[in-house]
Image (cartoon, grey):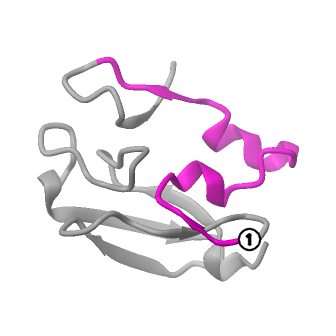
């Protein structure tokens, strides 16, 4: 799990399929930013689905949750706490309160 490929945070509107929701996304469907554990920030263009290196490095996935190891307690605060947004796009990843 290299820090350079482990996502830490992302702009609102990222969906499970790697796209950005037009209504919920901060930048609409144009894309958004992803912050990684090593501190770098990357713009992810919304013109094609995002691809994240899976935490076990077995390949790439569109769902950012597959890039975070859920078996590590310190990482669970992110993906394990995510729920599906019940608005117009049920695939938007968001925090459940």
Pick the front one: 7 or 47? 47
Q: Residue most toward the front?
A: 59
Say few, some or many: other residues with alpha carbon within 10 Å of mark 1 (under 14 / 14 to 19 / 20 or more). Answer: few
**Residue in the picture at 20% in, 50% down:** 26
Image location of residue 93, percent across then percent down? 42, 38
Pick the front one: 43 or 63? 63
**Which image quadrant is residue 90 in?**
top left
**Residue in the picture at 13% in, 45% down:** 22
Magenta stretch: includes residue 75: yes
Q: How many marks?
A: 1
**Which image quadrant is residue 41 in?**
bottom left
Q: Quadrant of the N terminus?
A: bottom right
Image location of residue 48, percent across then percent down? 25, 68
In the displayed structure, does residue 27 sit left or right of residue 45?
left
Residue 25's place in the image compared with 40, above or below, is above
In the displayed structure, does residue 81 sit left or right of residue 69?
left
Q: Residue most toward the right?
A: 72
**Which image quadrant is residue 2 in?**
bottom right
Which range is magenta? 57-86
**Residue in the picture at 58% in, 64% down:** 7
- Residue occupied by mark 1: 58
**Residue in the picture at 78% in, 45% down:** 70
Magenta stretch: includes residue 19: no
Image location of residue 40, percent across then percent down? 51, 81
Image location of residue 82, percent across then percent down? 55, 32
Q: Secondary structure at mark 1?
A: loop
Residue 10's place in the image compared with 90, above or below, is below
């Amino acid at each position: 799990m290299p820090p350079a490929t482990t996502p830490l945070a992302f702009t609102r509107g990222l969906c499970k399929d790697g796209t950005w929701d037009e209504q919920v996304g901060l930048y609409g469907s144009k894309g958004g930013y992803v912050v990684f554990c090593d501190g770098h920030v990357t713009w992810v263009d919304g013109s094609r689905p995002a691809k994240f290196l899976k935490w076990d490095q077995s390949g790439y996935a569109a769902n950012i949750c597959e890039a975070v190891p859920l078996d590590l307690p310190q990482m669970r605060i992110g993906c394990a706490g995510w729920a599906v947004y019940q608005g117009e796009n049920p695939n938007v990843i968001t925090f459940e309160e």
